[in-house]
Image (spheres, grey):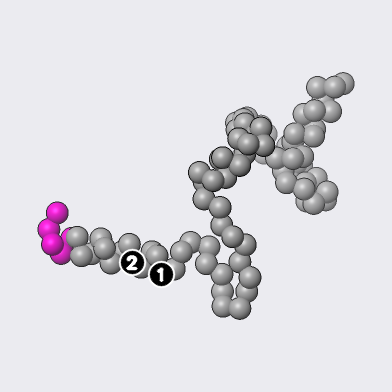
Amino acid sequence: MKKTGMAKSDAKKLMGQMAPAGAAAFGSVAAPAVDRREQRRLDQAAGLVPFAVKINADLVKQLQARAGEQAIDINELVGQLLAKGLQA
């Protein structure tokens, strides 16, 4: 890599450190961001396993609406619904 290319790369790294993704506006309180590795570790400790499923878009909208009504995460809602369905 040329000297100018390295300088440009270093400048991009520096600019990325100055304004991290998800930075809050001045005066507002930002929630601490958890990186993906940390989130994966927390999920594994809680016994959560990623499970991809292809379902109809209308069903997804219904799930999102119900999760919003109950003020819970969609993952939690789907887990509850699956548990009820398996018990029946």
> Residue 34 at x, y = what percent?
56, 52
User: Residue 18, labelled with which disc?
Assistant: 1
Q: Quadrant of the N terminus?
A: bottom left
Q: Residue at point 12% right, 58% down?
A: 2
Residue 54 in view here: no
Label total for image: 2
User: Residue 14, labelled with which disc?
Assistant: 2
> Residue 81 at x, y = what percent?
80, 32
Is 16 located above or below residue 48 in the figure?
below
Residue type at the position of mark 1: Met
Q: On the rendered structure, is 61 left or right of 51?
A: right
> Residue 27 at x, y = what percent?
61, 78
Check whether the beta carbons of the residues at disc 2 and disc 1 lie within 8 A of each other.
yes
Judging depth in this view, the residue of 56 and 66 nearest the camera is: 66
Residue 83 in view here: yes
The magenta-colored residue range is: 1-5
Task: Kindly report the secondary structure that dominates the magenta region of the rendered protein.
Answer: helix
Residue type at the position of mark 2: Leu
Estimate how packed mark 1 is, as few (under 14), some (14 to 19) or many (20 or more) residues with alpha carbons within 10 Å.
Answer: few
Judging depth in this view, the residue of 88 and 29 nearest the camera is: 29
Is 11 located above or below residue 57 in the figure?
below
Q: Residue at point 46% right, 64% down?
A: 20
- Label 2 and label 1: CA atoms lie apart by 6 Å
